[in-house]
């Protein structure tokens, strides 16, 4: 169908609308008891919407467009840069007291997949702050269009009559010629998609998503192009290949649709993208995807029990980052000047699954500084147990230099190295006494020198751009809380490092409350990061696996408490990692301790039981996966974004994997699969041995954990018709390049 109006770049920037949330916190409530029988009554009046000066300027521009009978469109550009500047010298926050009360809650939306959309729109004034949101109820066409016009900052409010609304829409040419709608009718999925697309710029190649919709032919023909447009840009999400065009649009879906329209970062990533290759009737496509790091995203990861990354993929899907283990000076330098290098096998394991690896090297902790250090001194026994001793310090530098070069010669880069992990615990920096302050200052001097040594070693080995360094703290202690001016030693270390990292465990009586974790991240970021990205590299709690164990605070089994913790944590992440949120989009990674353990163990932090070559997610692991899936389906949070798609079936594609966030992969689409006739085996042939792992239809994951030039998978999760197979690659070295000589199903 030919478009009757010209699509133009949106002047309404979604970021400005999202950032205006704070100003909308005191919006008047037009129906606070939630008892209205008319769903349209939950739309507030336009005069209740508080907007900033930038949006006012856009409103003026909109008026000019409307005079010219051009409806202003939202754009599709996503901002993948890191969030704005962090605060400095911020007092230690109380998340429960200072922040949570300022966020509105609908009683029936807490933990709902669409909660963020509903709450953000309420804070923007699009919906009233009623007691309940009624996510499964419906809305009239007129009610939806009023909400949509308000989101577009037009001179419309919830009390505008349908006749006046129709006159306004006719004047702006919002609807195409020949399209008539009943403003009193119940809004359907196809009508909602049509209206949302009319308020958004178009993109090319949307026709490819016909394949994704089993009931595509049930869509009214006049709305089909617009439905495909909303799917292509991620405003509408297709679940299980169904759209149900004639079904009523629920208020939850409506909230998602409007919020994704105005906030491009919240838009969902379609199951595939084959670029401009779509041809009617074609039964196979093979494309190569190139991904770059999304600076605004979050890398979720684990400590994968050293080398169980392939099992993590089998139950979690693609994970970009992993913590390996500890390398201690005393274990490697067994005689003066003699280094007993190990194979770095565990440290290299993440690369086999295309992950970035975090490695620890412990050097200075000793029993003289910290008699409670229960793992014993990291300094070899034949040196003075004091890093300030000139001989010990010189030996430590020689060791670190050799360690970095040996490590990089095996792993060939792509490493985040944490020198002297958990420094507060290792160096006994627990109080504000003079002895503690002296230790802190001495350690800081050592750390800064060590960073220089490590960088020089990497540079001389030719890997200067592959080594990143981080400083790691334990929780946030009373020492840190005394403020920046009393802890210059921390600022000096942040200057020397690339990342500021933390490990944090639960100390609230109610262990299901993530406030302590978020407070620690916030405080570290806004006081001691210098604007550099922060990482949580170890998070968890000790829990019992005993069947009759009871948590004394909640009365629940400890594993259920742990599950509730992750449910609450990921809920807060979805609010606070967004642009303008509490964490300012500067949280680079979040790793959980740990993924798998011996199922006979009585306690630990596992999110899975591991037996042989399989893992079963525990109840807390199920919540972790749900949280990651909810975040990773959105542009804002996914750690990578697709930069390019090219055809890969004519010439054997070369696949390069540089890190967990910068990599290439293949997408194999089969459009006419017959589960009754097909053998169901996928074969992948490489030019040289490497690792290969696949996802089927975004739900079934397989990683054989075998280094080979030939991989065969008995496909699971295949269905009749369209199937989308993602093929990922890894190798012990990183970056790595392999040529994929063959991909076929037989």
Image: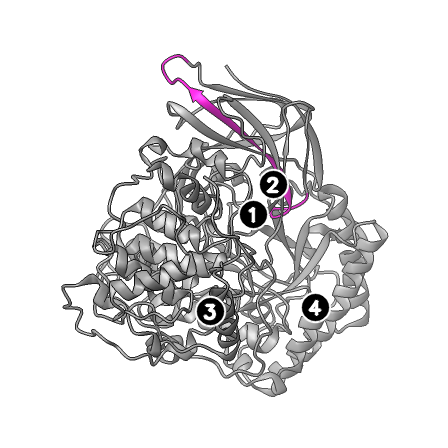
| Mark in the foreground, 3 or 1 | 3
Q: CA distance from mark 4 to mark 1?
A: 38 Å
Residue 558 part of the magenta-drawn span: no
Q: CA distance from mark 3 to mark 4?
A: 57 Å
Q: Callout 1: helix, strand or loop?
A: loop
Residue sitting nearer the eye, 6 or 453: 6
Residue 665 part of the magenta-drawn span: yes
| Mark in the foreground, 3 or 4 | 3
Q: Image quarter for residue 742?
A: top right
Residue at image position (26%, 77%) is 29
Q: CA distance from mark 4 to mark 2?
A: 39 Å
Instruction: Quickly name the residue at label 4.
Output: 385
Q: Position of residue 468 (x, y in %)?
A: 70, 57
Pointer 4 or 1: first along the chain: 1
Instruction: Quickly name the residue at label 1.
Output: 320
Q: CA distance from mark 3 to mark 2?
A: 37 Å
Pointer 3 or 2: first along the chain: 3
Residue at image position (45%, 73%) is 519
Q: Mark 4, residues whose alpha carbon is within 10 Å: few (<14), some, or many (≥20)?
A: some
Q: Callout 3: helix, strand or loop?
A: helix
Horizontal arrangement in the rendering, residue 656 relative to residue 213 (left or right)? right
Pointer 4 or 2: first along the chain: 2
Q: Mark 1, residues whose alpha carbon is within 10 Å: few (<14), some, or many (≥20)?
A: many
């Amino acid at each position: 169908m030919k478009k009757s109006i010209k699509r133009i770049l949106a002047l309404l920037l979604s970021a400005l609308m999202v950032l205006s949330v704070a100003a909308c916190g005191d919006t008047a409530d037009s129906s606070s008891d939630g008892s209205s029988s008319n769903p349209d009554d939950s739309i507030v009046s336009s005069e209740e919407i508080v907007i900033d000066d930038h949006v006012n300027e856009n409103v003026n521009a909109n008026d000019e467009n409307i005079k010219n009978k051009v409806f202003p469109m939202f754009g599709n550009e996503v901002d993948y840069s890191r969030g704005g500047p962090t605060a400095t010298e911020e007092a230690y926050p109380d998340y429960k007291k200072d922040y949570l009360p300022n966020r509105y809650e609908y009683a029936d939306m807490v933990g709902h997949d669409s909660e963020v959309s509903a709450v953000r729109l309420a804070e923007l004034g699009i919906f009233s702050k009623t007691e309940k949101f009624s996510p499964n109820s419906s809305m009239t066409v007129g009610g939806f269009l009023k909400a949509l016009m308000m989101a577009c900052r037009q001179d419309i409010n919830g009390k505008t009559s349908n006749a006046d609304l129709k006159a306004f829409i006719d004047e702006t040419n919002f609807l195409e010629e020949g399209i008539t709608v009943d403003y009193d009718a119940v809004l359907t999925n196809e009508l909602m998609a049509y209206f949302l697309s009319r308020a958004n710029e178009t993109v090319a190649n949307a026709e490819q998503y016909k394949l994704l919709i089993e009931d595509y032919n049930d869509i009214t023909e006049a709305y089909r192009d617009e439905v495909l447009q909303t799917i292509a840009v991620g405003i509408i999400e297709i679940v299980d290949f169904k759209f149900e065009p004639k079904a009523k649009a629920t208020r939850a879906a409506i909230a998602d649709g409007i919020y994704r329209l105005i906030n491009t970062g919240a838009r969902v990533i379609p199951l595939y993208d084959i670029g401009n290759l779509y041809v009617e009737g074609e039964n196979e496509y093979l494309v190569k995807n190139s991904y770059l790091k999304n600076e605004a995203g979050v890398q979720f990861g684990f400590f994968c029990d050293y080398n169980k990354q392939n099992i993590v993929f089998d139950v979690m899907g693609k994970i970009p980052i992993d913590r390996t283990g500890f390398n201690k000076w005393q274990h490697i330098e067994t005689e003066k000047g003699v280094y007993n290098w190990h194979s770095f096998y565990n440290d290299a394991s993440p690369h086999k699954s295309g992950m970035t690896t975090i490695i620890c090297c412990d050097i200075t902790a000793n029993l003289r500084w910290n008699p409670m250090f229960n793992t014993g001194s990291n300094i070899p026994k034949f040196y003075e147990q004091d890093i300030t001793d000139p001989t010990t310090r010189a030996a430590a530098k020689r060791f670190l230099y050799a360690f970095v070069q040996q490590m990089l010669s095996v792993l060939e880069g792509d490493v985040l190295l944490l020198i002297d992990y958990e420094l507060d615990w290792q160096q006994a920096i627990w109080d504000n006494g003079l002895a503690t302050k002296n230790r802190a200052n001495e350690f800081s001097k050592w750390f800064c020198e060590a960073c220089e040594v490590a960088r020089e070693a990497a540079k001389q080995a030719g890997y200067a751009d592959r080594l990143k360094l981080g400083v790691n703290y334990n929780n946030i202690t009373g020492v840190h809380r005394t403020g920046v001016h009393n802890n210059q030693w921390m600022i000096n270390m942040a200057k020397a490092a690339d990342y500021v990292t933390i490990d944090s465990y639960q100390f609230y009586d109610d262990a299901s409350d993530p406030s302590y974790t978020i407070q620690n991240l916030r405080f570290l970021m806004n006081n001691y990061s210098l604007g550099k990205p922060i990482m949580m590299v170890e998070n968890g709690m000790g829990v019992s696996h005993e069947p009759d164990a009871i948590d004394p605070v909640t009365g629940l089994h400890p594993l259920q408490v742990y599950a509730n913790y992750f449910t609450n944590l990921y809920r807060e992440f979805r609010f606070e990692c967004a642009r303008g949120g509490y964490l300012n989009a500067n949280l680079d990674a979040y790793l959980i301790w740990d993924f798998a353990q011996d199922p006979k163990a009585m306690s630990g932090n596992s999110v899975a039981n591991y037996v042989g070559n399989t893992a079963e997610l525990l109840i807390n692991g199920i919540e972790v996966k749900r949280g990651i899936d909810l975040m990773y389906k959105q542009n804002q949070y996914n750690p990578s974004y697709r930069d390019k798609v090219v055809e890969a079936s004519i010439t054997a594609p070369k696949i390069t994997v540089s890190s967990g966030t910068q990599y290439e992969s293949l997408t194999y689409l089969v459009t006419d699969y017959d589960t009754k006739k097909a053998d169901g085996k996928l074969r992948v042939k490489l030019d040289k041995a490497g690792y290969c792992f696949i996802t089927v239809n975004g739900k079934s994951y397989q990683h054989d954990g075998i280094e080979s030039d030939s991989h065969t998978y008995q496909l699971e999760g295949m269905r009749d018709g369209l199937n989308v197979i993602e093929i990922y690659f890894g190798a012990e070295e990183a970056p790595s390049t392999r040529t994929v000589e063959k991909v076929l199903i037989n």
